[in-house]
């Protein structure tokens, strides 16, 4: 009894050992870095994503054809080695030898298919190669760049029995390169080639149907190209062939809508509606959040907030990313109260806001003109030892700049009414304590950024200069312009908005010479003055009562512009402002006509 059980155990161990040996032989014989990858990435040719297993391996036996198989395996090893070294041409020559007569008749189709798969996958993963053309004259050779996807297409056409794997690899290669038309055309050919016969399909027939991953690659390529009609028709065709899109399919398409340069909020809402009606699919939080992002990009904050409320009513557990997206919609829609209420709701539910969340909240307060709340949020971030980045600081600086411009406009309207509707420039800075507080707060923020090592970019300086311009602090504005020039090696240079704001600061202070210098420096930096820049210069000349200087500065063809400058003080009566500008404009016009 004991002997019998021992024999049975030994026999079982030998069987397991034999199976493992065969598996190791198969893996060692056909393992290569390409055949286990299926390329569907749509970003760059060098990035690939593991999606499916390699094609089936051969089972070796002691048949007479093993000698031919062994010879062809050596050729397959050679192809893999050449591809590892980046020698596509050498791999193609070896593939021709494998199919030709030097290695014997091609009676082992599986080996030939594996070799084709290896080369096709390598071509679809690669970029361009230099192809030597005909000689150009007596010296030199014409070279042209050839996309390796074209080589893969030729290999697919040359296969005696093209496999589904070869088709899918080429289709995904086209889609990854953005060639949606070629990918769609090749997909149609594959559907015709592997058309299921009858309704009762076998397992092998189902595997011949283009996989969901290939459909997704083509769908994303069409969406990136704005071909949403093809997206809709392809989704319908998938359902008819029994290939059901999943939630990842819709999320990928919605992500394209959210990142598209064009406004695709209507397409996003249509895709969201299809996803909700799709049998067996429940849209997840990523689906709704991505649809919200697409609406925000299309400047439909109301639609984004509506989706957010629907998600809350459905009882889906929200995360910090969804809350932040909803607050971003509030920031774009100037709904600062709603943004702060969402922030409070996050904290009450135990979801910790991150730096991005606070940055969006600061932007919402800034767009709503609540600079005090924006600064309070910055203080809260410092208390929690959060890192404040450039974007968050810029949101706060922009909030101060908007508030300063509003206060300055109101102050000019008040001064105009107090002086009986007569314009009078004192040449001094505005005495509004609110405006003075704003530019001081702005410079404090710039100092904090410098001390904390946060990069101050062109937007930071331009917004700060705008605050100084509204307050009439021309010396501070000039200092900021010089600071930007000193940081030119870091890519920070004064732009047209910064120069114009500094000229406005000089004009509000009655400083004509600094304003003229800034105007000339702007042209020396290669920036073409626009109508707003000329308006700021003319306003500075009008404040300083320098019609001669203005007429000498403006070109001859711009004489008509003098009488048609932008009316800055919209709060004053139209007729009075028009007469004031035209009176100064006529002086300049007459001086220009005498030249």
Image: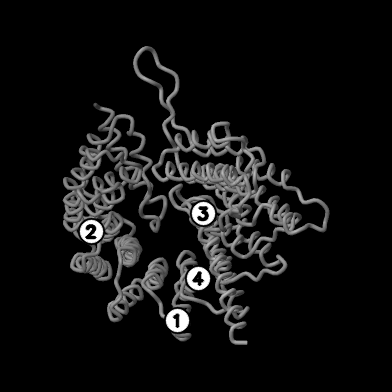
Residue at 41%, 46% in the rendered image: 84
Horizontal relation, residue 241 to residue 342: left or right = right
Going from the N terminus, do you reach mark 1 or mark 4 first?
4
Number of other residues with Cα within 10 Å of mark 1, as a class: few under 14, some 14 to 19, many 20 or more? some
Measure the alpha-carbon separation of dots 1 and 2.
Answer: 44 Å
Residue occupied by mark 2: 472
Q: Secondary structure at mark 4?
A: helix
Q: Position of residue 248 (x, y in %)?
A: 59, 63
Q: Position of residue 469 (x, y in %)?
A: 26, 57
Residue to which mark 1 is pinned = 351
Q: Is residue 147 above or below residue 509?
A: above
Judged from the image, the secondary structure of the residue bearing numbered disc 2 is loop
- Name the front one of labels 3 and 2: 3
State the image coordinates of residue 372 (x, y, percent, origin top left). Answer: 33, 75
- Rounded to the nearest angstrom, the CA distance separating label 4 from label 2 is 38 Å
Q: Position of residue 378 (x, y in %)?
A: 31, 74
Give the quadrant of the N terminus: bottom right
Q: Which of disc 4 and disc 3 is earlier in sequence?
A: 3
Residue 53 is tagged as none
Residue 156 appears anywhere in the view: yes
Q: Are marks 1 and 4 in contact (CB under 8 Å)?
A: no
The one nearer the camera, 113 or 211, is 113
Quarter placement of the C terminus:
top left
Q: Identify the residue position indicated by label 4 in the image.
A: 326
For mark 3, what is the residue?
A: 37
């Amino acid at each position: 009894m004991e002997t019998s059980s021992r024999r049975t155990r030994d026999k079982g161990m030998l069987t397991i050992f034999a199976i493992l040996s065969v598996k190791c032989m198969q893996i060692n014989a056909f393992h290569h870095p390409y055949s286990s990858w299926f390329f569907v990435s749509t970003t760059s040719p060098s990035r690939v994503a593991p999606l499916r297993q390699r094609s089936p391996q051969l089972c070796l036996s002691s048949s007479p054809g093993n000698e031919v198989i062994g010879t062809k395996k050596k050729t397959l090893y050679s192809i893999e080695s050449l591809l590892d070294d980046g020698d596509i041409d050498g791999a193609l020559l070896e593939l021709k030898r494998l199919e030709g007569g030097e290695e014997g008749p091609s009676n082992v189709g599986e080996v030939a298919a594996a070799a084709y798969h290896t080369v096709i996958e390598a071509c679809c993963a690669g970029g361009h190669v230099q192809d030597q053309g005909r000689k150009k004259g007596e010296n030199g050779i014409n070279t042209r760049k050839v996309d390796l996807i074209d080589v893969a297409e030729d290999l697919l056409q040359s296969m005696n029995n093209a496999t589904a794997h070869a088709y899918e690899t080429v289709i995904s290669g086209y889609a990854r390169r953005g060639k949606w038309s070629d990918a769609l055309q090749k997909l149609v050919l594959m559907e015709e080639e592997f058309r299921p016969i009858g309704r009762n399909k076998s397992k092998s027939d189902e595997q011949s149907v283009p996989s969901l991953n290939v459909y997704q690659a083509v769908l994303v390529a069409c969406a990136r190209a704005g071909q949403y009609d093809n997206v809709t028709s392809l989704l319908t065709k998938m359902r008819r062939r029994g290939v059901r899109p999943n939630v990842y399919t819709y999320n990928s398409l919605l992500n394209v809508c959210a990142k598209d340069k064009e406004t695709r909020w209507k397409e996003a809402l249509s895709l969201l509606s299809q996803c909700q009606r799709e049998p067996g699919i429940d849209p997840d939080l990523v689906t709704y959040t991505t649809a919200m992002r697409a609406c925000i990009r299309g400047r439909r904050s109301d639609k984004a907030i509506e989706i957010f409320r629907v998600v809350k009513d459905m009882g889906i557990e929200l995360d910090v990313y969804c809350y932040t997206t909803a607050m971003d919609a509030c920031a774009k829609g100037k709904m600062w109260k709603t943004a702060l209420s969402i922030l409070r709701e996050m904290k009450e539910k135990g979801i910790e806001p991150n730096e991005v969340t606070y940055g969006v909240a600061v932007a919402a307060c800034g767009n709503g003109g609540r600079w005090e709340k924006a600064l309070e949020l910055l203080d809260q971030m410092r208390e929690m030892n959060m890192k404040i980045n450039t974007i968050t600081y810029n949101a706060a600086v922009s909030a101060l700049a908007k508030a300063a411009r509003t206060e300055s406009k109101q102050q000019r309207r008040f001064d105009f009414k107090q002086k009986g509707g007569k314009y009078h420039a004192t040449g001094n800075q505005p005495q509004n304590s609110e405006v003075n507080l704003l530019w001081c707060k702005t410079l404090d923020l710039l100092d904090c950024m410098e001390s904390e090592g946060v990069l101050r970019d062109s937007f930071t300086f331009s917004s700060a200069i705008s605050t100084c311009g509204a307050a009439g602090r021309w010396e501070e504005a000039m200092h900021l312009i010089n600071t930007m020039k000193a940081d030119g090696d870091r890519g920070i240079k004064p732009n047209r908005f910064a120069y114009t704001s500094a000229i406005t600061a000089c004009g509000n202070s009655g400083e004509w010479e600094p304003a003229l210098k800034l105007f000339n420096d702007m042209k020396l930096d290669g920036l073409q003055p626009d109508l707003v820049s000329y308006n700021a210069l003319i306003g500075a000349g009008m404040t300083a009562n320098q019609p001669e200087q203005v007429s000498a500065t403006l070109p001859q063809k711009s004489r008509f512009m003098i009488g048609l400058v932008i009316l800055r003080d919209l709060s004053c009566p139209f007729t009075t402002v028009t007469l004031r500008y035209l009176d100064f404009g006529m002086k300049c016009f007459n001086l220009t006509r005498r030249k």
